[in-house]
Amino acid sequence: MVCCSILLTIVCWLAPVAPSAALSAAPVANRYSSFPYFLAPTEIAMANKSLFSFSGKRPNTLGVKDGKLAACPGTPNCVSSQASDLEHRVEAIAYTTSASEALAKLKSVIESMERAAIVEESNHYLYAEFTSGLMGFVDDVEFYLDDAAKVIHIRSASRLGQSDLGMNRKRVEEIRAKWA
């Protein structure tokens, strides 16, 4: 409850005191069609940046070792296609092209997503960081192309905290939907 009050205070504090002429002249349907409708155009342009930055430190366990991405920790804020338990398990993404074509397509999908930055790329590996909109939390997302099995293994994990409210699983499913 306290967090909601603080968040509401911040949002109200950032909102303009009076609506701009452009917003007041807009039809009601347009004003309410996307959140946040009360922001001026310059504030909407800044919407892709985080208000806070809780990025944490980049883990030193990233990468592929013996054909495996790092295992998920015991917390629910990680998913992996190589996990054996249902809480952390997601399906890998199948591909039928060459590994280089699959990697190019994967890179295009990641680059099309908001607040995503590709950090490392090699012939069979891609590592990206995704930053949350408001608080600036960073999730480490790794992809390993297993060309023998023709699948892309995925691991998406939050750097900080205990729960991610299902965000890592949702992100993997968004990537899967864009892949299709």
Image (cartoon, rainbow, N blue to C red):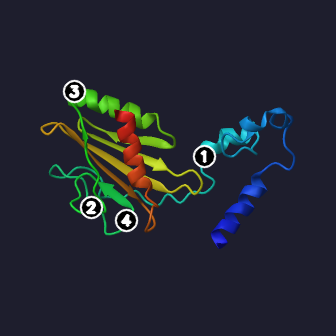
Give the residue drawn at x 35%, y 40%. Answer: 176
**Is 136 situated above or below 99?**
below
Amino acid at pointer 2 = Leu
Residue annotated with mark 4: 76
Q: CA distance from mark 1 to mark 4?
A: 26 Å
Give the residue drawn at x 31%, y 66%. Answer: 73
Question: Left or right: where does residue 41 sit relative to residue 61?
Answer: right
Amino acid at pointer 1 = Lys
Dot 2 or dot 3, earlier in sequence: 2
Q: Position of residue 170 (x, y in %)?
A: 42, 50
Residue annotated with mark 3: 97
Dot 2 or dot 4, earlier in sequence: 4
Q: Say which mark, if any, is on residue 49.
A: 1
Q: Say which mark, if any, is on residue 86.
A: 2
Q: CA distance from mark 3 to mark 1?
A: 35 Å
Say which element carries label 2: loop
